[in-house]
Image (cartoon, rainbow, N blue to C red):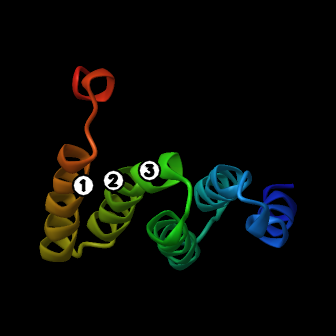
Amino acid sequence: MFLESDELAMRHRADGDVESLALDAAHRVALATPTAEGRLEWRRRGLDLASSGEDAIARRGRASWLNNLAWTHHDAGEFEFASRLFVDAYGERVSTATPSTSAI
């Protein structure tokens, strides 16, 4: 179901209103994927989507994608690389903070 959602969102990405749906689908596929390699692939895909998106909300999700990717590398024992990703995620969160998000 989530794969179908991703495919549908990617086909209609040019419409502009579905980037966040594509990111949501990629996130859910990453969570449901049974292999570490699969989770890594979907999290990279989500980060790429968030980084290249036109939608400001989708781009603000970049910090979350970096954080999720960092945890995937951490779980694989790649601690130094994970640490760099965590720092990047923090920097991204700080740079995109708004009054409502910085209070969280």
Mark 1–mark 2 distance (CA, rounded to whole Å): 5 Å
Q: Are marks 2 and 3 in contact (CB under 8 Å)?
A: yes
Quadrant of the image occupied by residue 46: bottom right
Left or right of residue 77: residue 62:
right
> Alpha-carbon distance for marks 2 and 3?
5 Å
What residue sits right under mark 2 in the picture?
63
Q: From mark 3 to mark 1, how far is it between C-alphas?
A: 9 Å
Q: Residue at x 44, y 68 (%)?
A: 51
**Residue 61 has which mark?**
3
Picture quadrant where residue 74 is located:
bottom left
Element carrying mark 1: helix
Q: Position of residue 58 (x, y in %)?
A: 52, 52
- Earlier-in-chain disc, 3 versus 1: 3
Residue 34, position as x, y percentages in the image: 63, 65
Residue 61 in the image: x percent, y percent? 44, 50
Query: What residue is shown at x 55% (from left), y 69% (from top)?
Result: 49
Residue 92 bears which disc, if any? 1
For label 1, the crowd category at 10 Å Cα-Cα, with few meaning under 14, some 14 to 19 and many 20 or more, is some
- Examine the rendering and report whether any part of residue 25 can be seen: yes
Look at label 3 and name its amino acid.
Gly
Q: Is mark 1 in CB contact (under 8 Å) with mark 2? A: yes
Amino acid type of the residue that numbered disc 2 sits on in the rendered structure:
Ala
- Of the residues shown, which amino acid type is indicated by label 1? Glu
Secondary structure under the numbered disc 3 in the rendered image: loop
Residue placed most toward the observer, 94 or 46: 94
Q: Which mark is residue 58?
A: none
Q: Specify few, some or many for label 2: CA neighbours under 10 Å numbering under 14, 14-19, or 20 or more.
A: many
- 10 Å neighbourhood of mark 3: few (<14), some, or many (≥20)? many
Up/down of 54 relative to 11, above or below = above
Q: Residue drawn 73% across and 54% down?
A: 18
Quarter of the image for the N terminus: give it: bottom right
Q: Is residue 52 left or right of residue 76?
A: right
